[in-house]
Image: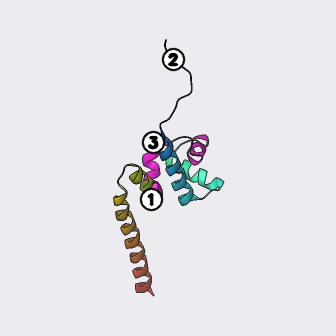
Amino acid sequence: MFPKTGRKLHSGSGETDLAIMISQALFAELGASHRATKTAMGWTGASERTVKHWLAATHVPKGNHLVSLARHSDQVLGAILLAAGRGDLRIALDLDAVRVKLLELAALLGGG
C-alpha cells in the first residue's frame, strides 16, 4: 500500500531550530513592534505576511531573503553561523563591532 499523500509539508527539526534562531535574532535586533516587521520588509522586499511568519518562527527565510537579513543584521548572521556549526566565526563579528566602536570613540575624543 502507498501512504496517503496530503498537502501538509513536514519540516525537519533542523529547519524548525533555524526558524526559532532566526526569529530570536530578529527580535533581538529589531524588537517586537510593528516597526520591526516594516524594517525587515524593507531589508528583504518580502511581504508583511512572510516577515510575520519569520518572526513567529513558523517559516525559515529562504535564498535571497536570508542573505538580505544576514547583510543587515549581525544577529541573524550570527544565528546562521551557529546553525552551520561555525559559531567560532562570531568572534570575528564581535571584534569588528568593537573596532567600529573604538573608531567612533577615537573620533569623539579627537574632535573634542
User: Extreme right residue here?
Assistant: 34
Is 45 displayed left or right of 110 in the figure? Answer: right
Q: Residue 3, which numbered label?
A: 2
**In terms of image quadrants, where is residue 106?**
bottom left
The amino acid pointed to by label 1 is Asp
Q: Residues within 10 Å of mark 2 (few under 14, many from 20)?
A: few
| Secondary structure under the numbered disc 1 in the rendered image | helix
Is 63 displayed left or right of 24 in the figure? Answer: left
Q: Residues within 10 Å of mark 3 (few under 14, many from 20)?
A: few
Measuring 39% from the left and 66% from the top, which residue is drawn there? Answer: 94
Nearest the viewer among 30 and 18 is 18
Q: Residue 74, which numbered label?
A: 1
Report the Cα–Cα distance between label 3 and label 2: 24 Å
Nearest the viewer among 64 and 6 is 6
The amino acid pointed to by label 2 is Pro
The residue segment tinted magenta is: 47-76
Eye-nearest disc, 3 or 1:
3
